[in-house]
């Protein structure tokens, strides 16, 4: 295995295994909810915490984990995340009660938060700038594969064995990734000791918890005074965090403001949040339409969207390579336009009696759009970030992605509920009312994608030879100042 030590592609395979698990567990659980309710004897509201507890822990802790990777070494944090995630998966699979399952899912989210930002940091470290887009394309392909396989694999496991195996399936993947981590991933360390901003961690964790919990649970509490108080507290804590970070910019802050002097990083961080909102704004109501109007099973509904994921997985590496050669601006603009056109086509095709196969052309176009977005978005965000700030940059980028997903789910959930109630009040059948609701909710992702196009226009033009983040050479010899 010595020849694979620090080989960029071997490192990418190892990182992809861990990344795959964390994304798979965002989608695989949904299909098992009815079986969990029956087996554990719990209500739907409580079962949904199996989903939201994981997402909440992931959202809140990513910035801290990204900065810890900068301070302690990304390989160390990646390996720790694998251990926590894998052991928590065992606890999920063996959980005797709903409370034990929810707690184990929160710990699983902690493991995912520890390892997720390290994947981008290590890709930046081991791949030279001219090949980084291709690597990010593969990284995006893994995301598409996890999204595609989640509902399908979950359906197979629940049907063939039982719901507990949707968690236990992570164990062999986690063990393999852990072993490979110490065989092929270089141990990139800071050249000197660093201090950890504990006050910043506490403020950011509290602020993100209040915001994420408020957005995630707002609908369950009818957006009452308590939710708005929580969101206001999150905003106040966030403001306090920014002021605290401003005073620490010369003392290793949790969020280095220097990152935002890079126009590409700032624009792409905004874009990643907008794209997350747009994806949830399309996928959630469309999945509900497929199951509640067309009466497809969860597995069949997932398979209707499979062409989108397949095309996205295929296009991603090529889009990344194109971004390496000519910059990502026009690739991203093409992707955003295609994704918006696909959403519009899905919406216009939807009717109370539409056949499932009528959606295939539109899903192919959305897949083309997503494939042209994911890799260039990550590449352009990290293109000029110095290696010693890569963990912080990745943590910020991934936090915005998760908060965008939470905000998108909250916004589209509220929009669907209000519009569906209004449509039913006019005397329409449920199928007709939900179809009309789907047409209205499409405005949300389309408007967000339009804002994303404006963010893309801010990208600097790619110039060959422009300095980029440092990398570990492909032969595996670390940089003398920063690796050991």
Image (cartoon, rainbow, N blue to C red):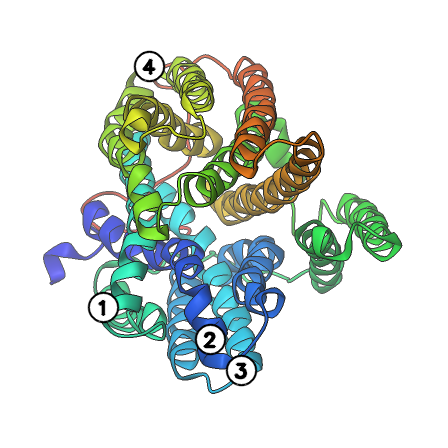
Please report whichever mark, 2 or 1, sits nearer to the chain's N-terminal start: 2
Q: Nearer the viewer, residue 306 or 131?
A: 306
Residue farthest along the bottom direction in this orientation = 96
- Horizontal side, residue 89 vs residue 253: left or right: left
**Callouts 4 and 3 close, C-beta under 8 Å:** no
Gap in angstroms between the C-alphas marked 2 and 4? 54 Å
* Element at label 3: helix
Residue annotated with mark 4: 326
- Horizontal side, residue 199 vs residue 93: left or right: right
**In the rendered view of the protein, which quadrant contains the N terminus?**
bottom left
Residue annotated with mark 3: 100
Gap in angstroms between the C-alphas marked 2 and 3? 16 Å
The residue lying at 39 percent from left, 30 percent from top is 353
The residue lying at 56 percent from left, 47 percent from top is 402
The residue lying at 53 percent from left, 67 percent from top is 50
**Callouts 1 and 4 close, C-beta under 8 Å:** no
Please report whichever mark, 2 or 4, sits nearer to the chain's N-terminal start: 2
Mark sitting on residue 176: 1
Is residue 182 at all visible to an observer of this figure?
Answer: no
List x then y, in percent, for residue 3. 11, 56
**Callouts 3 and 1 close, C-beta under 8 Å:** no
* Element at label 4: helix
Determine the image quadrant of residue 115: bottom left
């Amino acid at each position: 295995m010595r020849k694979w030590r620090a080989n960029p592609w071997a490192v990418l395979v190892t990182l992809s295994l861990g990344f795959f698990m964390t994304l798979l567990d965002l989608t695989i659980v949904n299909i098992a909810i009815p079986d969990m309710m029956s087996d554990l004897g719990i209500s739907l509201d409580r079962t949904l915490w199996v989903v939201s507890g994981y997402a909440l822990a992931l959202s809140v802790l990513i910035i801290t984990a990204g900065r810890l990777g900068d301070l302690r070494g990304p390989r160390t944090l990646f390996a720790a995340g694998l251990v926590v995630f894998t052991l928590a998966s065992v606890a999920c699979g063996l959980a005797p009660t709903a409370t034990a399952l929810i707690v184990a899912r929160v710990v699983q989210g902690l493991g995912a938060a520890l390892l997720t930002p390290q994947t981008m940091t290590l890709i930046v470290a081991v791949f030279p700038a001219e090949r980084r887009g291709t690597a990010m394309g593969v990284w995006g392909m893994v995301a598409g594969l996890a999204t595609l396989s989640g509902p399908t694999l979950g359906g197979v496991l629940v049907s063939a064995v039982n719901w507990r195996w949707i968690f236990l399936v992570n164990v062999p993947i986690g063990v393999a990734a852990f072993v490979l981590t110490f065989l092929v991933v270089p141990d990139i360390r800071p050249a000197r000791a660093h201090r950890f901003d504990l006050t910043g961690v506490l403020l950011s964790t509290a602020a993100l918890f209040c915001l994420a919990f408020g957005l995630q649970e707002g609908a369950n509490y009818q957006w009452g005074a308590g939710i708005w108080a929580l969101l206001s507290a999150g905003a106040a804590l966030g403001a306090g965090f920014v002021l605290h970070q401003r005073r620490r910019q010369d003392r290793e802050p949790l969020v280095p403001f220097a990152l935002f002097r890079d126009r590409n990083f700032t624009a792409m961080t905004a874009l990643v949040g907008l794209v997350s909102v747009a994806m949830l704004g399309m996928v959630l109501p469309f999945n509900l339409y497929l199951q509640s109007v067309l009466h497809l099973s969860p597995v069949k509904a997932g398979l209707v969207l499979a062409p989108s994921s397949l095309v996205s997985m295929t296009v991603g590496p090529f889009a990344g390579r194109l971004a390496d050669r000519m910059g990502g601006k026009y690739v991203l603009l093409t992707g955003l336009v295609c994704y918006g056109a696909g959403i519009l086509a899905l919406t216009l095709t939807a009717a109370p009696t539409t056949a499932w196969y009528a959606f295939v052309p539109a899903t192919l176009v959305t897949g083309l759009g997503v494939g042209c977005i994911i890799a260039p978005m990550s590449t352009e965000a990290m293109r000029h970030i110095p290696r010693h700030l890569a963990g912080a940059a990745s943590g910020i980028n991934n936090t915005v992605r998760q908060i965008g997903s939470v905000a998108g789910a909250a916004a589209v959930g509220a929009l669907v509920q209000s519009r569906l109630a209004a449509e039913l009040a006019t005397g329409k059948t449920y199928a007709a009312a939900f179809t009309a609701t789907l047409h209205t909710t499409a405005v949300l992702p389309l408007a967000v994608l339009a804002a994303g196009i404006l963010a893309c226009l801010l990208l600097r033009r790619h110039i060959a030879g422009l300095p980029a983040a440092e990398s570990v050479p492909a032969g595996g010899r670390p940089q003398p100042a920063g690796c050991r």
